Each structure stands twice: as C-alpha cells, then as structure tokens.
Amino acid sequence: QIVFLFACFAAVCLAAPRPDEGDEKAETLRLEAENNGVDKYSFSYDTSNGISRTEEGELKTIDDNAAIVVHGSTSWTAPDGKKFELVFTADELGYHPSIKLVS
C-alpha cells in the first residue's frame, strides 16, 4: 500500500508541467491547502505565469485494504500560447491521466 501511494505521488509529480526557463521569477498568487492528517487532504494554487493546480486525496477502504484515491487537475500555457489541461485520477487501479488542448 505504501508503494502504491508513492507510485501515485511520483506519477502526479512527473506529470505536472514544468515552467520554462523564463518562469523562474513566477510567484504564487493563490494557495489553499487543507489536511486533516488522517484520511484526506486538498490543495490548490495559481501562479503568476498561468499555472493552476488542484488536488484532493481521500483514504478509501476496499475489502479491508486501504488506498488513497486522488483526483486533480493542472493547467498551463505552453510557450506557443496554447493552453493545456491535465485531469487525473490515481486509485487502487493505477494512474489515469487525460490531457486536452483548452485553447
């Protein structure tokens, strides 16, 4: 179960868009986070360079086995001006991303 949680976290981190070199001075415009330390958490933020991210995780018990189910999304604007959105779920069945061109 710990391996599953780590795998989900790693997949989400690797899927998150990285700012290009011109974005090193980007600032956090909004940050909200909540974690009860037991069975759920959530966070969201927006940055000055147009990146938005939101994620919620909750402990789920299935047949006496516990897993964290995570839902989230992130959006960003590519250097060519196109805006993308990545929506994902990570659960006991794996990581399920979906990416689309928004504009």
Image: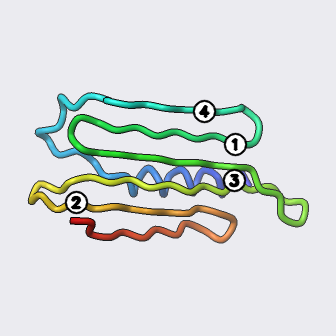
Among numbered discs 3 and 1, the one appearing first in the sequence: 1
Residue 68: give its label: 3
Depth-wise, is mark 4 or mark 3 nearer the camera?
A: 4
Q: Give the labeled residue for mark 4.
A: 34
- Mark closest to the chain's N terminus, 1 or 4: 4
Q: Label 2 crowding class (10 Å Cα cut-off): few <14, some 14-19, many 20+?
A: some
Find the distance from the CA under tag 1 to the CA under tag 4. Answer: 8 Å
Residue 3 image position (x, y, % from top left)? 66, 54
Q: CA distance from mark 3 to mark 1?
A: 8 Å
The residue lying furthest to the front in this view is: 103
Circle 2 residue: 83
- Residue 49 placed where, x, y %? 21, 40
* Contact between labelled residues 2 and 3, with CB atoms less than 8 Å apart: no
Res 40 label: 1
Q: Secondary structure at mark 4?
A: strand
Could you tell me the amino acid type at mark 4? Answer: Glu
The amino acid sitting under disc 3 is Ile
**Which quadrant of the structure image shows residue 80?**
bottom left
Q: Earlier in the sequence, mark 3 or mark 2?
A: 3
